[in-house]
Image (cartoon, rainbow, N blue to C red):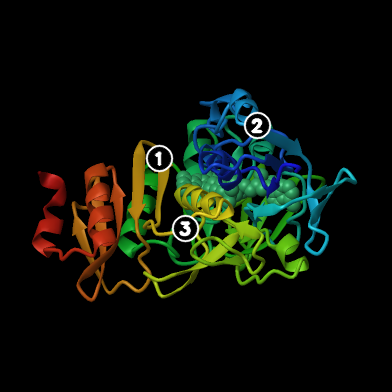
């Protein structure tokens, strides 16, 4: 009897973990890890941090070595998957080949949302998702250059910090009234606003891009209202969209991500999905959520591998995230959706370490911990176990 074959589409964080976990779960058949990026799977978070700042190399970012894949009999394949033929049980590749599968895993991740303003396709306008993107950005940067970053979310702010370290003049344009508005409380936004201004970043909130202009290359960003900001390069960080086209075209159920259950099963029994491309119903939050984080991609990939091997495992971990800017480490436990109270430990208007605890009906649901690893560990435990909290204890948490 021929060996069973598992195909993994997408060789990012989820794909790399899924391949390794398949072996750990006892998959004895073939594993082919198909990716359209030419490098072996690498860590994406450092792209806007150490890699952009020139402090690390792509080799150092490899998730696993080439020897690991060889030893585990995982076959990396550089190709783009163009279609899934579910009735025939095979994938159509950009190489013209059709590759049959017994089990299929979709780990296609997400891509940057494009800026729709006129002039957005000029040379000198960049997005930041892949190592190749960063290499292009780095070629376009030298000290003294003026960079305009569109979007004051985590990627935009991390990029701002890295470009300041390289000696560029940096302006961040945020459309809403504060940076990180979508994800944090006003106090945390005000803290990051202060830190970036102290580091020489020009932050402009309520700034809507009307157009980009220049001859062959971008030279300025024009705001609604007519103001013009000179630019040698523009980096757009306005969120991502999940890569779900393959799944949708194959008739799988898609709803802001490939729909999976808590065992990562899609609407086809032979196909699992994991990572930024997948959305699942989280009982804790009572709704379908698509997470964009390395810990979540890793957990879902482990569950997917178990599912492919017929073992019962469920997505259960509390979502958590991190962001590094300058010498600050932000760690976030849980999701703060629907919070009705904020308790602060430390003074974000003055300190460089503090925690913002988010409560809903008196229960701790999330925490933003800045340079406070102990608060982060504490919060994860309390939120996961839904333990009662004492507000006075929270306020004093950093002073022990
Ligand atoms: C600059 C940056 C900084 C970040 N910082 C953090 C952070 O600090 N902390 C954190 O938790 N998360 C961070 N993230 C998010 C994190 O990187 C993602 O959540 C994570 O990469 C998701 O993993 P994934 O495998 O689902 O997707 P990806 O890592 O995006 O991998 C998907 C892969 O699939 C490939 N692919 C897609 N379609 C096809 C196809 N048809 N055929 C072949 N290959 C295909 C893509 O090219 C890509 O290589 C950051 C992301 C970026 C871009």
Q: Is residue 28 left or right of residue 395?
A: right
x, y percent for residue 146: 60, 41
Assess disc 1: are there few (<14), some (14-19) or many (≥20) residues with their C-alpha within 10 Å of its C-alpha.
Answer: some
Image depth: mark 1 or mark 3 in front: 3
Residue 197 horizontal/vertical position (percent): 40, 47
Residue at numbered disc 1 = 199
Comparing 86 with 176, the one in front is: 86
Question: Is residue 88 something one can see in this rendering?
Answer: yes
Which residue was labeled with disc 3?
312
Of residues 82 and 116, the one drawn nearer to the viewer in this rendering: 82
CB within 8 Å, label 1 to label 3: no
| Tag 1 and tag 2, C-beta contact below 8 Å | no
Q: Specify few, some or many for label 2: CA neighbours under 10 Å numbering under 14, 14-19, or 20 or more.
A: some
Which residue is found at the position 59% from the left and 40% from the top?
A: 16
Mark 2 and mark 3 in contact? Answer it, CB < 8 Å.
no
Determine whether, in the image, residue 181 is placed left or right of residue 123. left
Mark 1 / mark 3, whichever is N-terminal: 1
State the CA–CA distance, disc 2 to disc 3: 24 Å
Q: In this rendering, would 210 be left or right of 342?
A: right
Above or below, comparing residue 161 to residue 67 in the picture: below
Looking at the rendered image, the disc whose residue lies closer to the viewer, 1 or 2, is 2
* Disc 3 residue crowd, few under 14, some 14–19, many 20+, Cα 10 Å: few
Q: Tell me the residue at 40%/40% (across/down).
A: 199
Q: What residue would you read off at disc 2?
A: 73
């Amino acid at each position: 009897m021929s060996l069973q074959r598992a195909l993994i589409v997408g060789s990012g964080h989820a794909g790399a973990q899924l391949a390794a976990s398949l072996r750990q779960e006892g998959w004895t058949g073939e594993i082919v890890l198909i990716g359209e990026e030419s490098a072996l799977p690498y860590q994406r978070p450092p792209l806007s941090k150490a890699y952009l700042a020139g402090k690390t190399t792509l080799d150092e970012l490899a998730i696993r070595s080439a020897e690991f894949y060889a030893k585990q009999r995982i076959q990396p394949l550089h190709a783009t998957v163009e279609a899934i033929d579910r009735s025939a049980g095979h994938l159509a590749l950009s190489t013209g080949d059709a590759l049959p599968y017994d089990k299929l895993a979709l780990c296609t991740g997400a891509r940057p949302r494009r800026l729709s303003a006129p002039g957005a396709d000029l040379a000198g306008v960049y997005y930041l998702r892949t190592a190749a993107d960063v290499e292009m950005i780095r070629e376009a940067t030298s000290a003294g250059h003026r960079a305009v970053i569109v979007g004051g979310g985590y990627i935009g702010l991390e990029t701002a910090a890295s470009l300041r370290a390289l000696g560029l003049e940096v302006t961040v344009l945020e459309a809403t009234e504060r940076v990180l508005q979508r994800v944090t409380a006003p106090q945390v936004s005000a803290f990051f606003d202060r830190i970036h201004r102290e580091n020489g970043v020009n932050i402009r909130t309520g700034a809507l891009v009307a157009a980009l202009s220049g001859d062959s290359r971008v030279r300025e960003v024009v705001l609604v209202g007519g103001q013009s900001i000179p630019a040698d390069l523009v980096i757009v960080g306005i969120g991502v969209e999940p890569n779900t086209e393959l799944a949708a075209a194959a008739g799988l159920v898609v709803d802001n991500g490939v729909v999976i259950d808590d065992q990562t099963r899609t609407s086809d029994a032979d196909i699992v999905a994991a990572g930024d491309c997948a959305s699942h119903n989280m009982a804790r939050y009572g709704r379908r959520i698509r997470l964009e984080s390395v810990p979540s991609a890793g957990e879902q990939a482990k569950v997917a591998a178990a599912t492919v091997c017929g073992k019962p495992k469920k997505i259960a971990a509390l979502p958590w995230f991190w962001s590094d800017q300058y010498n600050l480490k932000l760690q976030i436990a849980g999701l703060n959706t629907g919070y009705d109270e904020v308790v602060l430990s430390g003074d974000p208007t003055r300190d460089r370490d503090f925690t913002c605890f988010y409560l809903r009906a008196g229960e701790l649901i999330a925490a933003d911990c800045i340079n406070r690893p102990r608060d982060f560990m504490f919060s994860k435990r309390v939120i996961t176990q839904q333990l009662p909290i004492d507000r006075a204890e929270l306020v004093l948490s950093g002073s022990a």
